[in-house]
Image: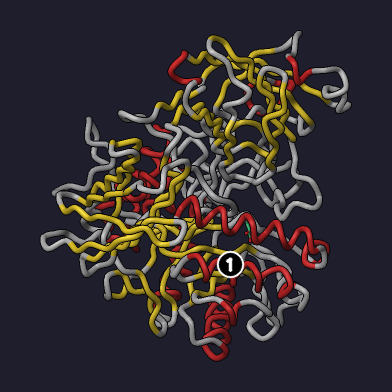
Amino acid sequence: MLYPQNNAHRRAYKLDGYWEFKKDPTAEGEALGWARGIDNTRTIAVPASWNEQANELYHYHGIAWYQTSFALNENDINERVVLRFSSVQYGAAVFINGHFAGEDRAPYLPFEWDVSDLVRSGDNLLVVKVNGEPLNEEPVRICDFYGYAGIDRHVFVCALPKAHITDIAVRAGADGKASIRVTASGEGNDAAVTAKIGDVPCALSKNGGCYTGELRLQNYERWSLENPALYPVNITLFDNGRAADSYKLKTGFRDIAVSGRQILLNGKPVYLKGFDKHEDFCVLGKGLSYALNVRDFDLMKWTGANSFRTSHYPYSEELLDLADREGFLVIDEAPFAGMDGTQFNDPKTCEKAVEYMKRLIDRDKNHPCVISYSIGNECDTADAASKKFFLPVIDAARQLDTRPLTYVAWTKPDEDNIYQYVDIIGLNRYYGWYPYENWPGSAAPGNIDAAVKQMDDCLRDFERVYTAPLIVTEFGADTIAGLHSTFMLQFSEEFQANFLRSYIRLIKRHPAVAGMHVWNFADFSTEQSPGRVMGNKKGVFTRERAPKQAAFILRREWLGESDDGLFCRGGGGAFKIPGE
Ligand code: GCB
């Protein structure tokens, strides 16, 4: 699905702003005719989760109704009008001018419908019924993160030409070759499509239902961490002898592959250093913020990170755009976290999982930053029934894309049923933090030396059983910013700094490990529980993005800075290293 854009042929109206909002705790809105309009509403901002926008909304996870209006002119309604939601948690039923437009429950993924028959010139009423939590049969769980709900990314109304481009897939390799596939709709038999990357043109030929072609750039720069060179791809659809539609996206020429224990970027081994993140910020909840994204990349770079995982769901398209521009390597995670036998044994849930995997790849396939899709996080893959769920997901992913697949879990090497089918093995380990009662010789919480020994054993066990690259996809310690201790006590900044440094130094000694992601980039909100002090505090940064002591340790471990780097310079040069 293409991201909306404005050009000579397309108009995209973003419906950001203040909308009207009404809770529906007894689910009676439909019967009361709310699809035709709601009254006695309160104001809510879009995009953003609803929970932190008002005291009365924080704990609300039921059904809620949103309403706004948008104006279209005569030109718009003579075209194909499409309504596009970039993501709604957890699913939406949509009504335009009182008529049903469509329903979709895909978590953290976009959906759109042709609403040409429902709109009129002038004002149009848009009403959205939102489910505040996922249905049981959906392959998505709110794990250790807060169940933020609502319209958290952009909503667009688009006017597209009747003959229009529906999809574009560009695969650009490190050798300068690009293959392009375009699908279109509404065009005549004599329609044609042209493509241009940079200055190099290419005529596409019609192949079954789509238009395909290849081109090669002679003078080009590869997309890499140091130089994330992006090239414009201009696609034009000609119908009846004139340009009917066009679309512009960006591509990067790069290869990603797994070879032995290594991940290769443009044929050279690349070591992943970075974080697991969450879409989570004060007031916004999971709402999209361009400024927050820019800040997060700035801080990630500052620590020396080169990659992150979109734990535990697909992040916004805008965030991936930024990763393309900034040269970050992304493990793009499907929303399948914490699945167990209940989901594995339900064929409908398994079918949905395949659908969502396909939709994730369809959305993200053109991003050079995406180096791997993670098919899930910490599911009960010691249960053989997990194959019923994951093998079709893996199969679907392999048919659509050549990117390596990752699976992330805590299972033991000989008990897991899924690791053997993926290309990269993700290990989540918290030795020395959580008690692991059923692991022999488990390190007591707080005992870093024993934890490191146990991690070492764990890596050796995996190295014996699997030949694929390992990534330590999670390790970390909750830390309350401002708590200090010389006794190496859990929750203190010193403990986290020492814990992370010890893990990092051990991990670096294992050549089978191709990377490490610290849990977590920043503190984030969770359900309340005795083990969560207003959220998960394993962030290297606070929720407001202030560094804890561990951030400086990462800088030293990942950038090789000397101790001098730990001292800040005053004045305008915030945290500048002398001589940098
Ligand atoms: C995990 C999960 C993550 C949790 C983390 C923790 O293994 O993948 O969602 O937040 O541990 O801090 O417990």
Q: Quadrant of ligand 1?
A: bottom right
Residue 136: percent from left, percent from top: 81, 50
Relative to 28, is 157 on the left or the right? left
Relative to 149, is 494 on the left or the right? left
SS under mark 1: helix
Residue 557 or residue 462, whichever sits in front: 462
- From this viewpoint, which residue is outermost toward the bottom? 464
Relative to 35, is 287 on the left or the right? left
10 Å neighbourhood of mark 1: few (<14), some, or many (≥20)? some
Residue at mark 1: C-beta within 8 A of ligand 1: no
Relative to 18, is 307 on the left or the right? left
Residue 523: percent from left, percent from top: 55, 44
Residue plotted at (62% across, 62% down): 377
**Badge count:** 1
Using the image, determine if residue 37 lies above or below residue 525: above
Residue 125 or residue 48, whichever sits in front: 125
Residue position for label 1: 396
Residue plotted at (58% across, 73% down): 451
- From this viewpoint, which residue is outermost toward the left? 219
Residue 455: percent from left, percent from top: 55, 76
Residue 541 or residue 111, whichever sits in front: 111
The answer to whether residue 243 shows anywhere in this view is yes
Q: Name the amino acid type tagged 1.
A: Ala
Using the image, determine if residue 83 lies above or below residue 73: below
Residue 543 or residue 478, whichever sits in front: 543
Using the image, determine if residue 367 lies above or below residue 156: below
Q: Specify the color scheme.
A: secondary structure
Residue plotted at (58% across, 67% down): 396
